[in-house]
Amino acid sequence: MPKLDYAKAGVDIKEEEKAIKSLANVVKYVRKGFGKPILTSHYAGVIDCGDFGIAITTDGVGSKILVAEAMNKFDTIGIDCVAMNVNDLIAIGAEPLAMVDYIAIEKPDERIMAEIAKGLEEGCRIANITLLGGETATLPEIIKGFDLAGTAIGVVEKDKIITGEKIAPGDVIVAIPSSGIHSNGLTLARKVVEMAGMSYHDEFDGKTIGEELLTPTRIYMEVLEIIKSCDIHGLAHITGSGLLKLKRLRDDVRYVIDRPLKPQKIFRLIQDLGEVDEDEMYRTFNMGMGFMIILPESEVEKAVKLCDGTIVGYVDKEKGVYIRDLRLDK
């Protein structure tokens, strides 16, 4: 089997970034006055609502849905939909309040919709948010199967928005473990499994490969308590592009992950089967580190008492994202 990477599997992050820029370069109009934007192009956007800001974000489950279809199991992907949105709100310091969902489907299926609803309900319970409503569109000429996405809102005091601008050399990086692959990199993971001639029903670490890949994305509500108790300089929800997500905070410092958490076994299976390079793994997956908190060293003890996080690295001068001595942002 040839060596694989995300681009060869069908997702070219660089090309995706170019396409996003081409969209952003045209859509430039902004509202004036009440409701004007005070944060854009981050994990979530924020609009000015007087004494506070309303944070808004949107995301979907992605090709994890194809694994759910292969396993005929749909009762957890709703959690992923909630998690991907809620975690992005938390990553700017906003408390999640509510969300809406959007399901585009080839043909309505009562059983599948009911199972999706179970996951949405559980995700909302964990995140303490309300699913206010949503939209279901039957699009047989466009959709094969279905797609699931959502949009969430949260609230944040305007002077407490966390963007990463306070990050400085000497800061410490704390990582909170992921629950597994979450909802990113599934295109590469699926391609590896398929090209290796394996099945999602094959046994793996006490369950099947498919069940492992469908493990729901962790929802990091404990971070809200850490924000209240500690001086936080930066937050990162590690999703698409892996540890490169740190560059979204500040790109004029160096992030060094010299003590990474041990990745779950599923990541090493993907790496070994697909002969995926180490740097590509950390540019594609969370590798066991689903959420990162950057803060002064004096604040670390308080923070780790409020979560199961561990120090994994530090911030230094110059630029770049490193996993030990390996630079990821080449």
Image: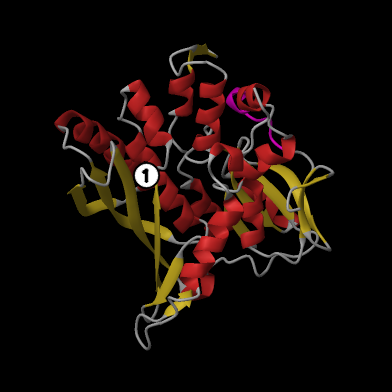
> For the N terminus, which image quadrant?
top right
**Neighbour class for label 1 at 10 Å: few (<14), some, many (≥20)?**
many
* The quarter of the displayed image where residue 66 is located: top left
Tally the numbered discs: 1
Left or right: 192 as drawn, with respect to 202: right
Left or right: 293 as drawn, with respect to 68: right
Q: Where does residue 81 sit, x and y in percent of width and height? A: 37, 44
Q: Amino acid at mark 1?
A: Cys
Q: Where does residue 33 sit, x and y in percent of width and height? A: 37, 88
Q: Main secondary structure of the magenta part?
A: loop
Q: Is residue 38 magenta?
A: no
At 37% from the left edge and 46% from the top edge, which residue is drawn? 82
Give whichever of 130, 184 is nearer the camera. 184
Colour basis? secondary structure
**In this view, 265 is above or below 79:** above
At 53% from the left edge and 16% from the top edge, which residue is drawn? 197
Left or right: 151 as drawn, with respect to 240: left
At 31% from the left edge and 51% from the top edge, which residue is drawn? 129
Give whichever of 154, 74 is nearer the camera. 74
Asked if residue 254 can be seen in this view, the reply is yes
Left or right: 12 as drawn, with respect to 141: right
The part of the chain drawn in magenta is 260-267
The residue at which mark 1 appears reads as 81
Give whichever of 80, 136 is nearer the camera. 136
At 45% from the left edge and 68% from the top edge, which residue is drawn? 45
Q: Secondary structure under badge 1? A: helix
* The quarter of the displayed image where residue 315 is located: bottom right
